[in-house]
Image (spheres, rainbow, N blue to C red):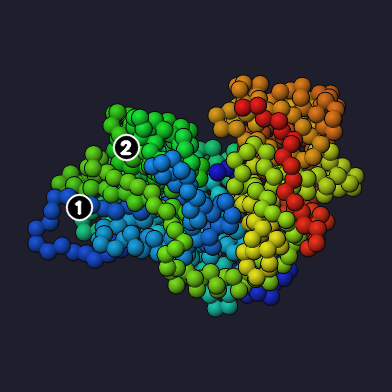
Amino acid sequence: MSATPQKNRASRRVLAAAAGLATVGALVAAMPAGAHDRGHGHGGGHGHGHKPRTVDVQLLSFNDLHGNLEPPAGSAGNVSKTHPDGTVESIPAGGVEYLATSLRTARKGNPYSVTAAGGDMVGASPLLSGLFHDEPTIEALNKLDLDVTAVGNHEFDEGATELARLQNGGCHPVEGCYEKGRKFKGADFPYLAANVTKEKTGKPLLKPYTVWKKNGVKIGFIGVTLEGTPDIVTANGVKGLKFHDEVETINKYARELDRKGVKSIVALIHEGGAPASTSYNYDCDSPGAGDGISGPIVDIAKGITPKVDALVTGHTHQAYVCTVPDPSGKPRMVTSASSFGKLYTDTTLTYDRRTNDIVRTSVKSANHVVTRDQPKAPDMTRLIDRWNKLAAPIANKPQGWISADINGRGSTAPEKPLGNVIADAQLEGLAPADKGGAEVAFMNPGGIRADLVHKASGSEGDGVVTYGEAFTVQPFTNMMNVVDLTGAQLVTALQQQVSGPNEASPKILQVSKGLTYTLDLTKSGADRVVADTIKLNGEVIDPARTYRVAMNEFLAGGGDGFPALGEGTNKLVGASDLDLFNAYLAAHSTATAPLAPPATDRITVIQ
């Protein structure tokens, strides 16, 4: 999902405590990835005698892992299942120890098995991975035997150079190598970015496609991220890059693969849709093919050439297995496996050796829960323990106390309790005249990456918020900006939550205390924000007056479809969002007087 990215996080992270942990090594020359056209079938293998005409290829897929190596805490770690009687069960899921076991179990008895991902494997990651620039996650994906992934928007959070390092290996240019005697090897699977080119040369940034081969079976994979990536990543992250139309790009490379004799093609697309139900087992082909899903992926699927046999998607963090008609009107499988490693999709592609193509009518697919009641994969447990030892001195430091869960990511309401805490923290930190003189603060909802969970995640005790937990909520270390905006611009910005690029899927800003207004969802477009109800400290916003507004640098650049916020002047750059969040927790909570979840009474919603 769209989220606050970061700008040059490496140079800002407060890593004094970690200086002694990391062995700084010289930047090593990038090594070529050794993963291209790899075809390891994860099972036994060579048939004897006459080969049958068709062979079933198992496609295992997942998306939007976001560096969640450990099981996600709180509501972010659950998936919903609807039972035949209509009751909904919440199932704890996710964590790479369980994902590895699930995938390895699924591969048994399937000699032709390929594992693919739909992007956002890294970025907006919890501290265990984010502190080390996501090297632990790439290492885990190598152990998972991932064959290929598309890039997502978050793969660009730290720019193209850092993405190339994740692919090719080498120690971090600023922080060096994290462990003595160990050099980061990079991904041994290809990252595909067919629709991302370099502005100067027009050439693809990374490989556009790869071909998986086994015993004469060939399947091409084309990978793209959403064309709108520059709108949801800071300018630094996408500097020097161009992002192209998903459909045109996939169709172009499908023709190229076809000319090379590769007739079986899967598209990995970091863009998605919204099913009518959040239950992972919802049938989105009811009453008809693809009737239960909406969003950008529907039009994309309808435009992609019939040469492509299946679409693995992501970005919206939703779970669905649908068939959406291709341009010739034939149904085609479109899947997404939620996020954070909570689900994986198992798709059967029947490969015809005579035509070298997939028999589309026999494609079957289902999502499966990565339950936490199965054995943990010991190699993943060792990996997590190793990196946790390095992270512990920073991760376990207490920052504050809470009396109950304060939901952010896990809240489906327009106004989220944790959103209010974050916006209040930003306002409080930047209100002093010498800090910017902020009167109001805005936080983008996609930048809230988790809940604050009351139950202890380790040995810290219930109710204690550690640095690692605070980092997981605000992992981007975005610098805060305070700018001048007129009242008219403020009103326009609030209307942009529900109009323009945000009309179909509103992005409701989290607002600091004192700002109130009515959101009327019975209306359409900009009218959904009732202009004459917008007040600051009880006074109607004056269109002609200048207000000092605090927000992260991503919003201040007009990100997430808020061009009005990008019009600010007289900018003052403040502390990072994470520093302000931690300072607020320290100032407003003690062990005996913990911070309670705030009321959500700033936005009055009419349904």
| Residue 485 seen anywhere in this rendered image of the structure | yes
Looking at the image, which is closer to me, 502 or 356? 502
Q: Please give left or right for residue 390 compared with residue 223 in the image.
A: right
Q: The disc labelled 1 sits on which kind of residue?
A: Val
Of the two numbered discs 1 and 2 on the same chain, state the one appearing first in sequence. 1
Q: The disc labelled 2 sits on which kind of residue?
A: Arg
Residue 290 percent coordinates (x, y): 37, 33
Asked if residue 328 is positioned above or below residue 239 in the image, the reply reads above
Tag on residue 332? 2
Crowdedness of circle 2 by 10 Å Cα count: few (<14), some, many (20+)? many
Asked if residue 399 is positioned above or below residue 429 in the image, the reply reads below
- The outermost residue toward the left is 49
Looking at the image, which is closer to me, 300 or 278? 278
Residue 202 percent coordinates (x, y): 48, 42
Separation of marks 1 and 2 at Cα, in angstroms: 19 Å
Quadrant in the picture for the C terminus:
top right
Residue 513 percent coordinates (x, y): 79, 40
Residue at image position (57%, 51%) is 75
Crowdedness of circle 1 by 10 Å Cα count: few (<14), some, many (20+)? some
- The outermost residue toward the bottom is 181
Q: Of helix, strand and loop, which one carries label 1?
A: strand
Residue with the mark numbered 1: 55
